[in-house]
Image (cartoon, rainbow, N blue to C red):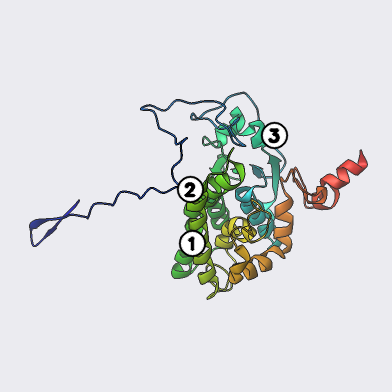
């Protein structure tokens, strides 16, 4: 029900009742879960991340964060959200913004580093990435990947349009990613790749939504070179590690299942961005899995890409 007024008279608008969902064999089975009146936490509930997920916030242990020599200190991991920020920092440096030099340290979420006291102090939500800017009179923390992208874009005046209309388009797509990706990661990715058993209903539900999102993006990219227009912006940096990489098997191994290569405009956009030197470097930072030559656990200087990837370090041992 919604109320309003017209000519001083109060009016009431009644929305039709939502129909009850139709049950089918894909939604029900003999072992259907019956929620209790009050949910309680079972520590080992199953799934890849069961050992680190918990329903409370705050630190679980004392653990100080390291600090390097540069004003910008990044604490992260090369997940899609982490890659957004390292790509942005490498793009800023490539564009000549020397103030974007940074130190990057691994936060191993599988080991629970995100619950250490030092990390919780800069991100009370215990999610990577998190950034501290020591170039200001008061050290400033920035957490949530979209907030970090916007912070850096405004700090350096780069990769975000100045024209108000173009800026609004860019920000709309940036926040489209922030609102859409939980359906891809926490929804589709979890039930397709990480859940302890494959269940048709949630996989179907989230597959449908992810394919709809890919279609939204594909239709936009049919009209523009980059997501928000002719220029490469923070919107591309936010969306690409999720939806661009989804067209390859590098994310959940689901490209064939989703028929992701059918979205030709997304594939074209993915390939153009993947070839950028700053993107190639940014994807390596804080990466702890995959080919050794693509892993740069910590980044402190541009020369680290040449001398301190894991293949070089392990050969030297």
Q: Which residue is mark 2?
A: 201
Question: Residue at 52% across / 68% down in the picture?
Answer: 228
User: In the image shown, does 284 or 131 lie closer to the viewer?
Assistant: 284
Q: Residue furthest right?
A: 316
* Disc nearer the start of the sequence (3/2): 3
To which residue does mark 3 refer? 66
Residue at 44% over, 34% down: 33
Measured in 3D between alpha carbons, the distance from the residue under mark 2 to the one under mark 1, in whole angstroms, is 17 Å
Q: CA distance from mark 3 to mark 2?
A: 44 Å
Dot 1: few (<14), some (14–19), or many (≥20) neighbours within 10 Å?
Answer: few
Residue 133 seen in this snapshot: no
Pointer 1 residue: 212
How many numbered marks, from 0 up? 3
**Residue 285 visible in this rendered orientation of the protein:** yes
Q: Are marks 3 and 2 in contact (CB under 8 Å)?
A: no
24 versus 117 height, above or below:
below
Residue 262 appears left or right of 180? right
Q: Residues within 10 Å of mark 2 (few under 14, many from 20)?
A: some
Label 2 or label 1, whichever comes before in sequence order: 2
Measured as percent of width and height from the top left, residue 184 is found at: 54, 52
Q: Is residue 190 above or below residue 262?
A: above
Q: Secondary structure at mark 1?
A: helix
**Dot in front, 1 or 3:** 1
Residue 159 found in image quarter = bottom right
| Residue 107 % position (x, y) | 66, 37
Helix or strand or loop: what does disc 2 sit on?
helix
How far across and how far down the image is residue 192, in percent? 58, 47
Give the farthest residue toward the bottom.
223
Q: Give the residue at x 35% y 50%.
A: 22
Q: Quadrant of residue 234?
A: bottom right
Disc 3 element: loop
Does label 1 or label 3 sit earlier along the sequence?
Answer: 3
């Amino acid at each position: 029900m919604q109320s309003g007024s017209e000519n001083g008279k109060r009016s009431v608008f009644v929305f039709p009742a939502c129909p009850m969902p139709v049950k089918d064999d894909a939604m029900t089975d003999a072992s259907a879960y019956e929620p209790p009146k009050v949910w309680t936490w079972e520590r080992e509930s199953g799934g890849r991340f069961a050992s680190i997920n918990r329903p409370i916030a705050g630190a679980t242990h004392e653990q100080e964060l390291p600090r390097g020599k540069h004003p910008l200190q990044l604490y992260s991991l090369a997940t899609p959200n982490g890659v957004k920020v390292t790509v942005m920092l490498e793009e800023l440096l490539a564009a000549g913004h020397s103030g974007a030099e940074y130190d990057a340290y691994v936060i191993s979420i599988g080991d629970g580093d995100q619950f250490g006291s030092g990390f919780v102090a800069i991100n009370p939500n215990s999610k990577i990435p998190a950034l501290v800017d020591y170039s200001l009179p008061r050290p400033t923390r920035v957490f949530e990947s979209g907030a970090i992208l916007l912070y850096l874009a405004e700090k350096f005046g780069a990769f975000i349009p100045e024209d108000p209309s173009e800026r609004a388009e860019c920000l709309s797509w940036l926040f489209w990613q922030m609102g859409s990706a939980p359906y891809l990661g926490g929804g589709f990715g979890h039930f397709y790749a990480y859940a302890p058993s494959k269940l048709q209903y949630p996989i179907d539900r989230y597959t449908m939504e992810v394919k709809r999102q890919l279609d939204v993006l594909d239709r936009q990219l049919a009209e523009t070179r980059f997501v928000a227009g002719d220029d490469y912006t923070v919107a591309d940096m936010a969306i690409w590690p999720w939806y661009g990489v989804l067209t390859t098997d590098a994310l959940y191994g689901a490209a064939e299942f989703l028929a992701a290569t059918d979205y030709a405009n997304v594939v074209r956009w993915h390939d153009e961005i993947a070839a950028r030197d700053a993107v190639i470097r940014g994807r390596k930072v804080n990466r702890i899995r995959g080919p050794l030559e693509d892993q740069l656990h910590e980044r402190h200087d541009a020369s680290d890409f040449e001398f301190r990837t894991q293949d070089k370090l392990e050969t030297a041992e």
